[in-house]
Amino acid sequence: MKKIIYILCLNILLYASGFGNGFGNGFGNGFGNGFGNGFGNGFGNGFGNGFGNGFGGGKSYNFDAVDKNKEENITTKKIGYDIYLTVKEKDDKSFTGTVYTVARDENDNNLSDVNETEWDNETSKDVTLTGVDKNISKKAHIYIEWKYSKMMKTTSGENNSTDDFAIIPTKYLFNIQNNAVIKAGETYEVNATDDDNNTQLYDQNLSNDKSDRNATLIYHLNGNDTPENFNIEFKDGNAKFYIKDVGLYTLEFNDTNYSAIDEDDGTKEKDRTIYGEINVSVIPYKFKINLKNKTIYTPIYIGDKNYTLELNLTALNKQNEITANFDKDKNATDVNISLEFNNTLAWSNENIDLNYSITTKNSDDKFVKLENKLQDINYTLLESNFTNGVADFRIDLYMQKNISLPNSPVDINIKEVNTTASDIINDGLVLDDNITFYYTKLLTEDVFTTYKETNSSIVLLVYDVNNSDASNRDLNIMSLINWYKLNKEFDINNYIMKENSNFSSDNIDINLTLYSGIGENNISIDNNTTPQTTKGIIHLDTPSYLWYSKFNEVYSYSNSSNCINHYCITYQYKNINNSSQSDVGSGTFEGSEVNNTLEVNSSHKGIKLYR
């Protein structure tokens, strides 16, 4: 009996051993699967593993992923491109079952579609990850999950690739075309993109740290430009930049920092670089005309340039900084300017021509005649006029004078000075100056006196057929019809050069002193000679814009000249040696009208004879 029991026990032990291998495997696969499917993966894995290990001995595996056909490492990948890998069992164990592979970021968000591959007693297998267009990552990895089933048992596990890697955009894309003309200081954008130029998928993962980018601005006149001429701000995969100064530039974005994790794994630098390049021509954002000085003499004479604007034109960026590269030796170009008039005002006389001169450092001060009346003045400032973004120039207005054809006053409204470039903002100068050009002449007075010191009156006359200014006084002189005493203050020293005036008499010494007033001035004559009687003609040197000659005679003020050709004063002094001297002597003093419309000689009692 004992023998039977022993044999039974031995058989049971032997059977148990068979059960562990045979039934246990069956149970582990069959029952384990049943349990796993029936009661959940957790229970299946827990119970199945426990049951299988306890009763059947399930295997564990250790998977890794590397670049296809490589022994180790995963190199930098680019968004929009499939990832080709070799998944292998690190201990060279043969595996039969299912392997799931996917690219993930460091927060375990999927960066690709999940690849599912069936293995059949294999130690490695090539896989392709598609759908690599979810996002980019500085630190990605390959997540691997494997499982197999035997009898009632499912065994599974998970591994991460040994090597981390970067998934980067393929390029930087600018929101302007290559070789575009852009404006200094105006903001433009560059975005990280894939080859299909999609940007919205990657923005949130690009660092805002400027050190992640190497942006180089190359100025094609002097090579790499200074950082001061370049401003850039990175934010959420988007870079906003502007170039401060004008010129031809190449802007390069050369980012290898984003894929720095792959520096040591054999990735070629060109393959882990996010690159963008664009050539641009930068022009000023605006031209600004600045008034340095303005001179308006009163009155303004026909024949004289008494309206003067001293100006400069500055080339600016959007931040209102001068673009110093807009220079004659660098990147300056010609700039057209326009002096604009109010064309609603009419000329009072169509025979009058408005002329102008524009003076720069490199141009002559020559007057240019306008072809049409009240035509806007258009002028080109040459590139040679610009130094460090600034050009100085002066505008003088001039109304041509015909000395034998007087004209009534001409009113002009000068509106503004502007630049006319269509692609650059004009910041012009508003003037709104109302000016009047007067045709004028002088009226002189002869002197017959018994005083050593005496005065002679000089009156400024204006020609005005319509007497448009009621403040001007009519002198009621027949020979001076349409001529009026101009009721404006003027400085006689500007109109008579006493140092150049001559006295046509020998051995006489007189001094002239000029006194200004409103419309009428005085010349003080100081006779320093001793003869009983002094007589002669004072020839006055006056500028041509005050000259008038009915018969268009040649202007001259020499001692030998005729007073019909210029302004002069006939002077006579008589020493009567008595205590009651007077400015009025007896008898008749004769003279001739000079430089006005009177054609005959006239005689006047006393000392006054108007020239």
Image (spheres, helix red, strand yellow):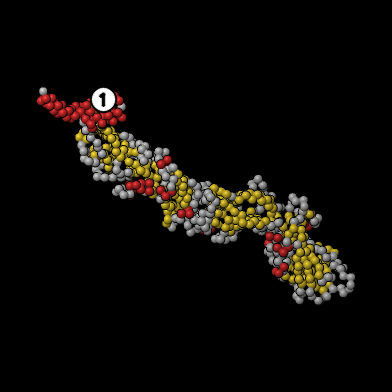
x, y (%) of residue 535? 79, 71
Q: In the picture, which quadrant includes the N terminus?
A: top left
Please rate how many residues cluster around mark 1, counting C-alpha atoms within 10 Å: few if below 14, some from 14 to 19, many from 20: some
Q: Is residue 219 found left or right of 163 in the rendered image?
A: right
Residue 216, visible in the rendered structure? yes
x, y (%) of residue 144? 29, 37
| Residue 421 versus residue 533 in the image, above or below | above
Q: Is residue 297 found left or right of 100 in the rendered image?
A: right
Viewer-nearest residue: 119 or 167: 119
Q: Residue at x 70, y 66 (%)?
A: 497
Identify the secondary structure beneath mark 1. helix
Residue 143, by quadrant, is: top left
Q: Residue at x 53, y 50 (%)?
A: 319
Q: In the picture, which quadrant includes the C terminus?
A: bottom right
Q: Residue at x 36, y 40 (%)?
A: 105
Q: Is residue 466 found left or right of 135 in the rendered image?
A: right
Q: Residue at x 27, y 41 (%)?
A: 65
Q: Give amino acid for label 1.
A: Gly
x, y (%) of residue 592? 78, 64
Please give the residue where the numbered disc 1 appears in the rendered image: 34
| Residue 245 versus residue 606 in the image, above or below | above
Residue 133, visible in the rendered structure? no
